[in-house]
Image (cartoon, rainbow, N blue to C red):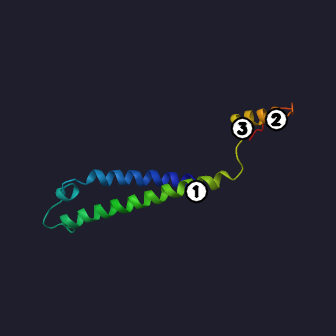
Amino acid sequence: MYIILVLVIIVCVLLGLIVLVQNSKGGGLAANFSAPTQVMGVRQTADFLEKATWWLVGILVVLCLMAPIVWHNSTGSKPKTTVVNQQQNANNAQQDGNTATPTAQNE
């Protein structure tokens, strides 16, 4: 359960860093390192950053869709008793003519 939360945080930090490195007008990281002897050209660096952005967005969407499923499975199927539920149970018992009040359950 907490593994997905940690992964979401890591992906968000990486996504933020990659988006900040990019320039909206095509500069960014690629413009800073445009030496003629560079292994990756300006266009290849921009392509890499764009692909990394899309991959991280996809991973973030998948993790966010998985989180409720994992959270629901880890909490179990037994519903929790709340104060509102206890009050509703007491009101139902009084309406049925039963004067006994339900006892609070500690979980």
Which amino acid is tagged 2?
A: Ala
> Looking at the image, is 43 positioned above or below residue 29?
below
- Report helix, strand or loop for mark 2: helix
Q: Marks 2 and 3: CB-CB under 8 Å?
A: no
Q: Position of residue 38 (x, y in %)?
A: 18, 66
Q: Distance from label 3 to label 1 (Cα)? A: 24 Å
**Quarter placement of the C terminus:** top right
Q: Nearer the viewer, residue 92 or 11?
A: 92
Q: Position of residue 9 (x, y in %)?
A: 45, 50
Q: Distance from label 2 to label 1 (Cα)? A: 35 Å
* Foreground: disc 2 or disc 1: 2
Q: Nearer the viewer, residue 59 or 91?
A: 91
- Report helix, strand or loop for mark 1: helix
Residue at 33% across / 62% down in the picture? 52
* Foreground: disc 3 or disc 1: 3
Q: Which residue is mark 2?
A: 93
* Foreground: disc 2 or disc 3: 2
Q: Distance from label 2 to label 3 (Cα)? A: 12 Å
Q: Position of residue 65 (x, y in %)?
A: 50, 57
Which amino acid is tagged 3?
A: Asn
Q: Residues within 10 Å of mark 1 (few under 14, many from 20)?
A: few
Residue at 86% across / 33% down in the picture? 97
Marker disc for residue 48: none
- Report helix, strand or loop for mark 3: helix
Q: Which residue is mark 1?
A: 69
